[in-house]
Image: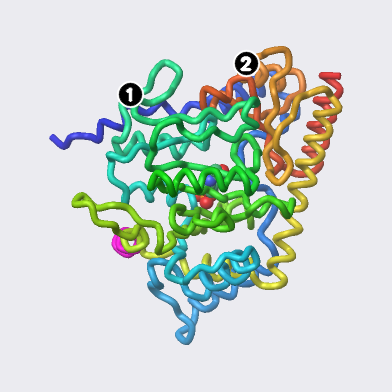
Amino acid sequence: MAQINDNYLKLKAGYLFPEIGRRVRAFAAENPTAKVIRLGIGDVTRPLAPAVIKAFHDAVDDLAGIDHFAGYGPEQGYDWLINAIIEKSYKPLGVELKTEEMFISDGSKCDCANILDIFALENVVAIGDPVYPVYNDTNVMIGRTGEADEKGYYENIVYLPCTEENGFIPALPTGKVDIIYLCFPNNPTGTVAGREELTKWVEYALANDAVIFFDAAYEAFITDPEIPHSIYEIEGAKQCAIEFRSFSKTAGFTGVRCGLVVVPEGVMGTTGTGERYSFNKLWLRRTTTKFNGASYPVQRAAAAVYSEEGWAQTKEVIDYYMENARIIREGLQEAGFTIFGGMNAPYIWLKTPGGLTSWEFFDKLLNECNVVGTPGSGFGPSGEGYFRLSAFGHRENVVEAVERIRKNFK
Ligand SMILES: *Cc1c(COP(=O)(O)O)cnc(C)c1O
């Protein structure tokens, strides 16, 4: 009989969002007239930009005719998309990248998971806490960890607590690690890292021959010119960092699916016999073997984000979400809450009042305000006592939710 991958049995059941759904459904059944407002799940609500839609339609028309039909494209993505991203998104930051250093994918979640393919299991991995759960669970699935303890920490992973005391930016590991996941602007805490913090991490990585996985899914939400959009704005990062970006939150592609990975040629690891070897070569090999490219219309649509029109329209949508963030942040501050994030990031991370646990506050907010958010403890043990609200809702819902919370808690 075929044997299963037992590592999957070490995973905690997908608990957070199903449990939220269960509690909301139970509440709605008992209170059928209540208008529940959801500021929980990190999905966008605004439609795609008109320039993106036009490019998408045009690309479908290409497929309808003999002259412009497109079949398999390059597995790593079309040059016209890669070069548009480099020109418009990296050059202005002072970051030079080669076409061969960027890979287009069908989204960043897969990339963050698949990248583990090209790293040996023996590597020691450091992960923030609280964190985007994909980083942790994919390491469990491939067998890098032991079992979880009662808190939810897995054996063989180095957890880096992100707390109010350290401003939700983790301290450097005390020992030597080989792989470090960083996500800025951060999901779930909405924290950003400045040049100084990122420099500290790059220096650590260079000194320890470690690789940083830098998840920049929310870089487009940065408005402060002092905050780096890319890890490669830091000197030396092209020798030690792999960067992930996504069109999901930036351009509303959560349902369309497109992302990218940058693997600079200078990022090296060691082979079993001790020679240095380029991760870029391995990632190319992996991509060409296991992937057949993001779809042609999707890449055309993604390229339209970098057109003059598309860029301006995309920015408008981001401004809309960031105005939501401002409304939530300021409204809750006025109501006496302690608030983090919500600037340069679409998430507001609040401290639960009166020492309530994250789930106690979830129930209180649902019952008293009919507003749904996400319990911080669902992102890791250090998230206990915190709560995440997302700025991705419709404006009128955001305004009403904040009004209800203010009335209830003042
Ligand atoms: C949403 C999100 C992503 C992007 O995922 P996609 O698969 O591209 O939709 C990546 N990292 C974090 C932290 C996210 O919140």
Label tally = 2
Give the Cα separation between the discs numbered 1 and 2: 25 Å
Residue topped by disc 2: 357
Q: Residues within 10 Å of mark 1 (few under 14, many from 20)?
A: some
The picture places residue 1, in percent across and down from the top left corner, at 13, 34
Q: Quadrant of residue 137?
A: top left
Secondary structure of the residue carrying tag 2 is: loop
Q: Amino acid at mark 2?
A: Thr
Q: Residue at x 47, y 87 (%)?
A: 67
Magenta residues span 284-290
Please name the predominant secondary structure of the magenta segment in the image. helix
Secondary structure of the residue carrying tag 1 is: loop
Q: Amino acid at mark 1?
A: Glu
Q: Residue at x 18, y 34 (%)?
A: 3
Question: Could you say which is closer to the camera, residue 406 or residue 208?
Answer: 208
Residue topped by disc 1: 147
Q: Residues within 10 Å of mark 2 (few under 14, many from 20)?
A: some
Whether residue 33 is visible to the viewer of this picture, yes or no, is no
Does residue 286 belong to the magenta stretch?
A: yes
Instruction: From this view, report whether residue 338 is shown above or below residue 360.
Output: below
